[in-house]
Image (cartoon, rainbow, N blue to C red):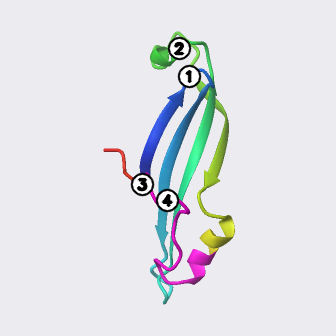
Amino acid sequence: SKLLSIGNDAEGGYIETRWNMVGELDRLPWKPRIDVIGRTKFWYSGEKGQEEEICDGDSRPVQVYFYDEMWEIPAGLALLQLVTPAGTIANSNCASGDDVIA
C-alpha cells in the first residue's frame, strides 16, 4: 500500500488520508491483482493542543474514536479485479492526484 496524501482538519477534529491498496494473487492462473485507491477519515478525541503531548506520559493521549473509509471505485468493480487479469479494471474513477508522498 502507498500513502498518496494526508491532511489534518484540526477544527473538524479529523485526519484524512488518501491511499492506494494493492494485493496480488500470483497463485491463480490469471494472476489477478486488487488495486484500489481510497480515502479514510479518522476522527480523534483529546484536549486541544494535546497532540504535541502524546508521548509525555502524564497526559491523556489522543485517540481515534471513529473512522470512515471510501473507495474511488464501486466495491463490485474492485471484486471484479479478482476474477480478471491484472490491469483490466482501473483502480480509480479519478484521473489526477495520484502522486505518492515522499
Foreground of the two, 71 or 83: 71
- Earlier-in-chain disc, 2 versus 1: 1
Which residue position holds label 4? 21
**Neighbourhood count class around disc 1 (C-alpha, 10 Å): few under 14, some 14–19, many 20 upward:** few
Q: Pinpoint residue 40: horizontal percent, then vertical percent.
A: 58, 44
Give the image quarter of residue 13: top right
Q: Quadrant of residue 42?
A: top right
Label 3 – label 2 distance at C-alpha = 32 Å
Whole-angstrom CA distance, mark 1 to mark 3, is: 24 Å
Mark 3, residue position: 98
In the rendered structure, are the residues bearing label 4 and label 2 in contact, judged by CB atoms less than 8 Å apart?
no
Location of the C terminus by quadrant is top left
Magenta: main secondary structure equals loop
* Tag nearer the camera, 3 or 2: 3
Q: CA distance from mark 4 to mark 3?
A: 12 Å
Earlier in the chain: of badge 3 and badge 2, it is 2
Q: Are marks 1 and 4 in contact (CB under 8 Å)?
A: no
Dot 2 amino acid type: Gln
**Residue placed most toward the observer, 44 or 72:** 72
Q: Nearer the viewer, mark 1 or mark 4?
A: 1
Judge the density around disc 2: few (<14), some (14-19), many (≥20) Cα neighbours within 10 Å: some
Residue drawn at the location 52% of the way across and 59% of the way down: 94
Which numbered marker is on residue 10? 1
Residue underneath mark 2: 50
Q: Amino acid at mark 1?
A: Ala
Identity, as a three-letter code, of the amino acid under mark 4: Met
Q: Residue at x 56, y 20 (%)?
A: 61
Question: In the rendered structure, which segment of residues is drawn in magenta?
Answer: 80-97
Is 87 colored magenta in this rendering?
A: yes
